[in-house]
DNA sequence: GCAATTGGGTAGTGCCACTGTCTAATCTGG
DNA sequence: CCAGATTAGACAGTGGCACTACCCAATTGC
C-alpha cells in the first residue's frame, strides 16, 4: 500500500507518518520509484505500536524511538530489551537541584532486603531514591522499609508479567510482548490502583466511622 | 520572608515563583505594601509540593493546579480529594480516533468481578478500557479477565495506601497524605515493578533454560 | 497528454513551561 | 532626606516538542 492508504488505515495523517519516518520510528517503505514507496502490514502494525507508546503510555517521540530500536536490535531477547527499555527516563531526571551523585543507597537497601538481583545501572533505582528523598523533604516519614510491602506486590506483578512474556511461543514476538506489557500496561495498572483506592475508601467510609 | 529568599530556599527562581502565583498554584503572600509581600513556611512547603508533582510525578502545571485546588477545598476529606484528583487525565484522552461514547464495558466487568464499588465517572475506567482496546488492536489477546490477577494486587496496594492515609492523625493533613501517596508514589511503584521484572527475568534466565 | 498523487525536504504553527524586561513603589543605610 | 537595591505585577519573548503546511519534481493512471 502507499502512504495515503497507510494513513487512512491507521488514522494517522500522512504528514505525521512522514515525520515518524524522518525520526526513524517507522522504517521506510520499499521504494518502487523515486517518488513512490510501498508499505505493508508490518508498517501498519508498527505505526499502531508507535501511537500506543506515545498516545496511551505518554512516551515522547524520542523515548518511543529508543524503545523501538532496542526492540529491533534484540528481537528474540526480551531480557535484553527490558534492560535497554528501562533506560527511558521518567520526567525530572535532567536538572537535579542539590546533589546528584549519590548511588541510590536506599534503593540498594530495598533490593538487598528483597533478595533481588538488579543491575546497578537500572535507572529505576534512582526513581525510588528520588521519590523517597522528595517525600521526606515534605516531612512525610518514608524510607525503604515503608516500601517493602509495595515491593512484595511489585514482585508478584513482575511474575505475572514474565509468565505472560514466556507464554509467547514465537521468540520473535517475545521482545514485543515485553515492551507492550511493560509500557502499555503501566497506565492500566495505575488505573487499577485508583479504582481499588476508591473502592477501599468508600468501604472504609460507609462501614464504620471509627476503629 | 520575601520572594527572593523563598526562591533561594526552594531552589526555584523568583521568575518561576511569580509564574506559579499567576497560575494560582501558590497562594499569594501577605501584602505588606504595594510592592512588598511576606511569605512563610507554608509557602515554602507548598512550593516543594508543586515541584514534586510537576518534577517527580510529571504532572503538567495545569493538572498540578487541579490537584492542589481539590486538596485545598477538602482539606480534611481525603475521600473527596481522591475522587477529584482522579479526574486528572492521562495523556491521550483528548482526541479519540474512532469511537468515544462507549461506557467502558470491560472495566465495568472487571470492577463487577472484583466486587468493587466505584463511581461510574471515575476516568480510570476509561484508561483500563482504552489499554485493552489498544492491546487487542496490536493482536495481543488481552481482556478484563487477564487483568484480574493484577486487580487483586492493585487491591492490596490500595489497602496499603489507605492504611497509611488513615494513620495520619491530623485530619488537616490527610488530604495532603492522600495526594502525596497517590501521585508521588506512582513513579516509585512503576520503578519497583521494573526492578522486580529485571530480577525475575535474570532469575529465570540463569536458573534453567526450559520448563 | 495531463490532472492528480506521491516522496522528500524545509519551514511554519500552536502549545507549554518558563524567563526576561519594564515600571513604579518600597525599603535600607547613612 | 536621599541614593541604591529590592520588589510586585504585568507582559512580551524564548526554546523545546509534536506535529502540520507547503513546495517541487517525479510518477501514475486514465
Image (spheres, coloured by chain):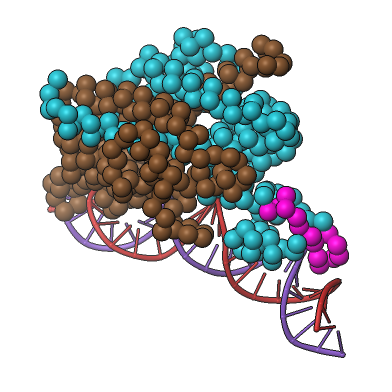
Chain colours: A cyan, B brown, C purple, D red
Which residue is depicted at the point 52% across and 48% down?
B133
Q: Work out whether B14 lies above or below B200.
A: below
The segment highlighted magenta reads A31-44
Quadrant housing residue B184: top left
Q: Would you say residue B148 sits in the magenta stretch?
A: no
Which residue is depicted at the point 70% across and 30% down?
A169
Instruction: Identify which residue, B122 or A106, lies in the foreground.
Output: B122
Q: In which quadrant of the rendered image does the N terminus of chain B lie?
A: top left
Which residue is depicted at the point 48% across and 59% down?
B99
Horizontal side of D9 relative to D21 (left or right) equals left
Q: Work out whether A193 lies above or below B72.
A: above
Percent across and percent down for residue B9 are 31, 32
Q: Would you say residue A33 sits in the magenta stretch?
A: yes
Percent across and percent down for residue B187 are 44, 32
Percent across and percent down for residue A13 are 61, 63
Residue B8 in view of the camera: no
Horizontal side of C13 relative to B107 (left or right) equals right
Residue B118 in view of the camera: yes
Label total for image = 0
Q: Work out whether B144 lies above or below B101.
A: above
Quadrant housing residue A192: top left
Which residue is depicted at the point 83% across and 59% down?
A31
Q: Work out whether A197 lies above or below D30.
A: above
Percent across and percent down for residue C2 are 81, 89
Q: In which quadrant of the rendered image does the C terminus of chain B lie?
A: top right
Horizontal side of A210 relative to C7 (left or right) equals left
Amino acid at each position: 500500500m502507499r502512504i495515503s492508504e497507510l494513513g487512512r488505515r491507521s488514522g494517522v495523517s500522512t504528514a505525521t507518518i512522514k515525520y515518524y519516518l524522518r525520526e526513524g520510528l517507522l522504517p521506510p517503505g520499499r521504494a518502487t520509484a523515486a517518488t513512490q514507496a510501498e508499505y505493508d502490514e508490518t508498517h501498519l502494525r508498527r505505526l499502531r505500536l508507535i501511537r500506543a507508546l506515545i498516545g496511551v503510555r505518554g512516551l515522547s517521540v524520542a523515548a518511543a524511538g529508543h524503545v523501538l530500536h532496542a526492540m529491533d536490535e534484540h528481537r528474540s531477547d526480551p531480557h535484553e530489551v527490558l534492560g535497554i527499555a528501562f533506560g527511558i527516563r521518567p520526567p525530572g531526571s535532567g536538572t537535579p537541584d542539590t546533589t546528584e551523585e549519590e548511588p541510590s543507597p536506599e534503593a540498594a537497601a530495598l533490593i538487598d532486603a528483597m533478595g533481588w538481583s538488579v543491575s546497578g545501572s537500572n535507572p529505576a533505582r534512582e526513581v525510588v531514591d528520588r521519590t523517597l528523598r522528595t517525600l521526606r523533604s515534605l516531612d512525610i516519614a518514608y524510607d525503604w522499609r515503608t516500601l517493602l510491602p509495595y515491593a512484595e506486590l511489585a514482585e508478584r506483578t513482575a511474575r505475572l508479567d514474565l509468565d505472560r512474556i514466556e507464554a509467547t511461543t514465537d521468540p520473535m514476538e517475545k521482545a514485543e510482548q515485553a515492551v507492550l506489557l511493560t509500557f502499555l500496561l503501566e497506565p492500566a495498572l495505575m488505573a487499577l490502583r485508583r479504582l481499588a483506592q476508591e473502592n477501599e475508601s468508600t468501604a472504609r467510609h460507609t462501614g464504620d466511622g471509627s476503629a
